[in-house]
Image (tube, rainbow, N blue to C red):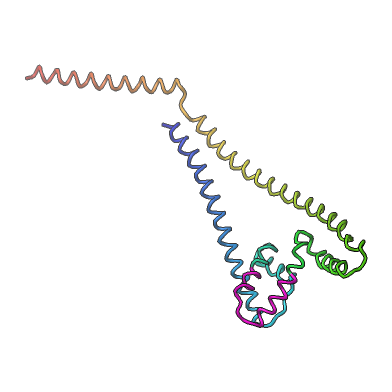
Amino acid sequence: MKSGIFDLVVAGSYVFIIIAFAIFMSWLTIQRRKNAEAMRKNIYSKLKSEIELSSKDVVNIGKSFDLTAFQSRKVIYKIFRDTEDKASFESLKMLVQEIETEEPYDEMPDEVKPSLVRLSKITEESNEESDKHILSPITSTLSKYVELKSEQEKLKKQTYRAYVVTVISFVVGAISFYFTLTSPTAKDIAHEIQTASELQQLEHNKSSNADAKSGAGS
């Protein structure tokens, strides 16, 4: 009986973990959509007020809504697609062009993006062939820096996930260990069976004696 309860508790624990994870991921998705919609309204309001925005403004506004730079730009692209106001369209057109200029350096640190964009324009306008490749060593070095930083972030996330899994495994293991300690041994089970058998035999004997007395009385 206890073994059955133990199996139910373990199965229930895993089902609970899976359901909780699914709910959490669904909540994240819904929250991200809500944040994107809130940012869309915020940007649209600023455009109506004729506030000029830069690509950096877009990223910073997105951060306030817990959106990444990529997600923030998607909001701008959707507004640009849906806008029907001429003034807003022209303002967005310039903003989108600025964003597209910076997109090749999307993975670079925000503080160096303006410099890279400016250097890119200078090299494009230069007549010197050597200037065409001036950005290559810079972007290569920065890419390695970003890659290293990204690996560190991934390692932090993996460490955190491993910690969560360890805690969950410990809890499930502790429950399993408890039920293992409290579950009956083979000797206990044999004793229970023998006791139950003796009780059944006793009840049978009582029933037989009662029937015998009843037959003798008649």
Q: How many marks?
A: 0
Residue at left offset 51%, top offset 30%: 180
The image shows residue 98, relative to residue 4, as above or below, that is: below
With 3 as the anchor, is 147 left or right in this view?
Answer: right
Magenta: predominant secondary structure element?
A: helix
The image shows residue 182, relative to residue 9, as above or below, that is: above
Residue 72's quadrant in the figure? bottom right
The image shows residue 26, relative to residue 92, as above or below, that is: above
**In the image, residue 81 lies at what x, y percent?**
62, 72
**In the image, residue 154 lies at what x, y percent?**
71, 49
Position of the N terminus by quadrant: top left
**In the image, residue 112 lies at what x, y percent?**
82, 64
**In the image, residue 63 lies at what x, y percent?**
69, 65
With 23 as the anchor, is 164 left or right in this view?
Answer: right
Q: Which residues are magenta?
A: 75-98
Residue at left offset 59%, top offset 42%: 168
With 25 as the anchor, is 57 left or right in this view?
Answer: right
Was residue 50 drawn as part of the magenta stretch in this picture? no
